Image: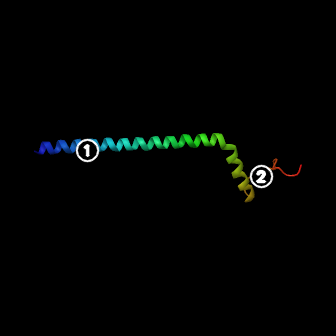
Amino acid sequence: MAFIISHLTSRTYVALRRQRGQGLVEYALILVLIAVVVVVVLLTNGQAIHNLYSNIACGMGIGHCTLGDQGGDQ
């Protein structure tokens, strides 16, 4: 009887460990997918994001402000 109980508990433990490992792999895959999306967004929109933050910093009086073509009087 004790053998049967120990066998069942060990099999349950192994099954729970396998599920926990599967969950960790799923979370890792989700994090990799998010990282890939962030890299793609930054590569495609990086300059626009840089300009946005530069304009905000310049408006607050911090950072290096450059006078580029801002669509003013020509």
Mark 1 = which residue?
13
Is 9 displayed left or right of 29 in the figure?
left
Is 56 displayed left or right of 22 in the figure?
right
Q: Which mark is residue 65?
A: 2
Q: Position of residue 17 (x, y in %)?
A: 31, 43
Above or below for 62 versus 14: below
Q: Nearer the viewer, residue 60 or 69?
A: 69
- Residue shown at 66%/43% (left/top)? 45
- Residue shown at 29%/44% (left/top)? 16
**Which quarter of the rendering shows the N terminus?**
top left
Is 13 displayed left or right of 26 in the figure?
left
Three-letter code for the amino acid on which mark 2 is drawn: Cys
Quadrant for residue 46, please give it.
Answer: top right
Three-letter code for the amino acid on which mark 1 is drawn: Tyr
- Residue shown at 17%/44% (left/top)? 6
Is 42 displayed left or right of 60 in the figure?
left
- Residue shown at 52%/43% (left/top)? 34
Cα–Cα gap, marks 1 and 2: 61 Å
Q: Secondary structure at mark 1?
A: helix
Q: Secondary structure at mark 2?
A: loop
Of callouts 1 and 2, which one flags the residue occurring earlier in the amino acid sequence? Answer: 1
Marks 1 and 2 in Cβ contact (< 8 Å): no
Categorize mark 1 by other alpha carbons within 10 Å: few (<14), some (14-19), many (20+): few
